[in-house]
Image (tube, rainbow, N blue to C red):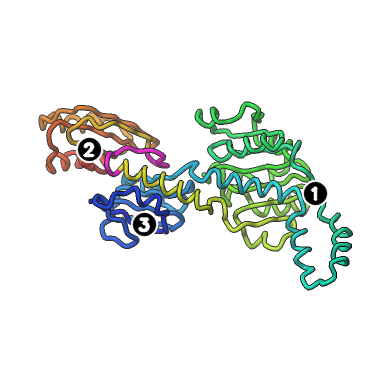
């Protein structure tokens, strides 16, 4: 029986995919085989030796010590695209809020509470509504920075709304390129996109290379009175650079899902309380994807949507399967196969892939695998862990 530790409330629709006769799932459990979480911050000390995998029901994994997990041979899974539609719809809201005086107008009407004269209220509204005049987004230029699962959906939405859409992504994948509508004009670099866009929507992962990508230097290229939207990650944007740009009147407004004290109370900033994936549908989608990936790994050793291990899949061909994590250095795979050959264990099928400093193998064996053989493989220099699947 597999033991799965849940560190946040996970959608029942996801947890129901773990058969109760094969899985024990609880928020407190001894010697878990895997961890399933959302926003809970996991420390290195939380990852006990029994843990074979960690699944995050969401895209970001900044709450998981990924480098440490790689060192100890623990794959970390995420769920890219599972909450994409929820984020896309919130970006739509942001575009509308950023183009019209909707929130100030609503606040003004609320301030009239207690006014009993309908005629007087009507005259006052007619007089004051010009203060909340905005513009339409049709015909405006939407610049999408990051064209992955969410960014491509935002780009397509912009086209549907009648916007001119331009995009920039220095690391766009083949799959993402296929998803992207041909009407999206590709920009060669970020400064060019910033100089052309009326609305700039960020959809990048938080990496060292993307930290403070929007900074004083990059904002010097921004089109006057542009609106910046950040529904990706807080640290992609350097807050001091944004406030300076707003103060100078270059940026017209900043709309983000990541409030900070420096931004609170500004009339040219709209702050949302991290609502990007806060829909019942997104939580279901993330949970289902995370559970399915975790289940396939625990039962078959297959890896999909891991942020630190290579993607790998092999159909079962009978016999016993072993999953081996090792440092990505020469001769280790040969040493593993030599141990099996010395023990007269026949290999039915195998697959080996690597990613950066880690390599991972699935090997289907004829017959049985004894603990002695597994220990011999584990003792090979560079092997991190060996798991019978």
Q: How far apart are marks 3 and 1 (CA)?
A: 46 Å
Residue at 53% across, 32% down: 176
Residue where numbered disc 3 is placed:
6
Q: Which of 68 and 152 is in front in this view?
A: 152
- Count of picture labels: 3
Left or right of 7: which side holds 150? right
| Contact check, label 2 and label 1, Cβ < 8 Å | no
Q: Residue furthest front?
A: 118
Residue at 78% across, 73% down: 114
Q: How crowded is mark 3: few (under 14 residues within 10 Å), some or many (20 or more)?
A: many
Magenta part of the chain: 298-309
Q: Is residue 299 on the magenta stretch?
A: yes
Residue at 32% across, 59% down: 26
- Main SS, magenta region, reads loop
Q: In which quadrant of the rendered image does the C terminus lie?
A: top left
State the mark number for residue 322. Answer: 2
Q: Distance between the residues labelled 2 and 1?
A: 62 Å
Q: Please tell me which of labels 3 and 1 falls first in the chain.
A: 3
- Discs 2/1, front: 1
Left or right of 318: which side holds 227? right
């Amino acid at each position: 029986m597999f033991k799965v530790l849940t560190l946040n409330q996970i959608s029942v629709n996801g947890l129901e995919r773990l058969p109760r006769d094969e899985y024990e799932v609880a928020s407190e459990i001894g010697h878990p085989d895997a961890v399933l979480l959302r926003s809970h911050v996991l420390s290195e000390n939380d990852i006990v030796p029994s843990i074979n995998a960690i699944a995050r029901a969401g895209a970001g994994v900044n709450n998981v010590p990924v480098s440490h997990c790689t060192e100890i041979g623990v794959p970390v899974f995420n769920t890219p695209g599972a909450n994409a539609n929820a984020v896309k719809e919130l970006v739509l809201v942001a575009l509308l809020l950023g183009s019209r005086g909707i929130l100030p107008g609503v606040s003004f009407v609320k301030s009239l509470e207690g006014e009993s004269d309908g005629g007087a209220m009507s005259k006052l509204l007619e007089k004051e509504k010009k203060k909340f005049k905005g513009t339409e987004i049709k015909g405006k230029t939407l610049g999408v920075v990051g064209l992955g699962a969410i960014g491509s959906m935002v780009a397509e939405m912009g086209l549907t709304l009648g916007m001119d859409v331009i995009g920039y992504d220095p690391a766009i994948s083949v799959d993402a390129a296929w998803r992207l509508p041909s009407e999206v004009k590709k920009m060669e670099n970020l400064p060019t996109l910033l100089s052309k866009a009326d609305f700039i929507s960020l959809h990048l992962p938080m990496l060292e290379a993307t930290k403070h990508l929007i900074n004083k230097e990059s904002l010097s290229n921004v089109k006057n009175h542009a609106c910046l939207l950040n529904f990706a990650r807080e640290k992609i944007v350097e807050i001091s650079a944004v406030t300076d740009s707003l103060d100078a009147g270059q940026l017209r407004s900043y709309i983000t899902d990541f409030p900070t004290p420096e931004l609170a109370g500004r009339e040219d900033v709209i702050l949302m309380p991290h609502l990007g994936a806060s829909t019942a549908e997104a939580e279901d989608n993330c949970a289902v994807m995370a559970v399915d990936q975790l289940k396939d790994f625990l039962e078959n050793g297959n890896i999909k949507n891991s942020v630190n291990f290579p993607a790998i899949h092999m159909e079962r061909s009978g016999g016993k399967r072993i999953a081996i994590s090792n440092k990505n250095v020469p001769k280790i795979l040969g040493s593993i196969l030599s141990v099996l050959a010395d023990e007269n264990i026949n290999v039915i099928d195998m697959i080996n892939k690597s990613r950066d400093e880690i390599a991972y193998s699935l090997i289907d064996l004829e017959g049985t695998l004894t603990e002695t053989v597994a220990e011999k493989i584990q003792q090979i220099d560079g092997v991190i862990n060996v798991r019978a699947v």
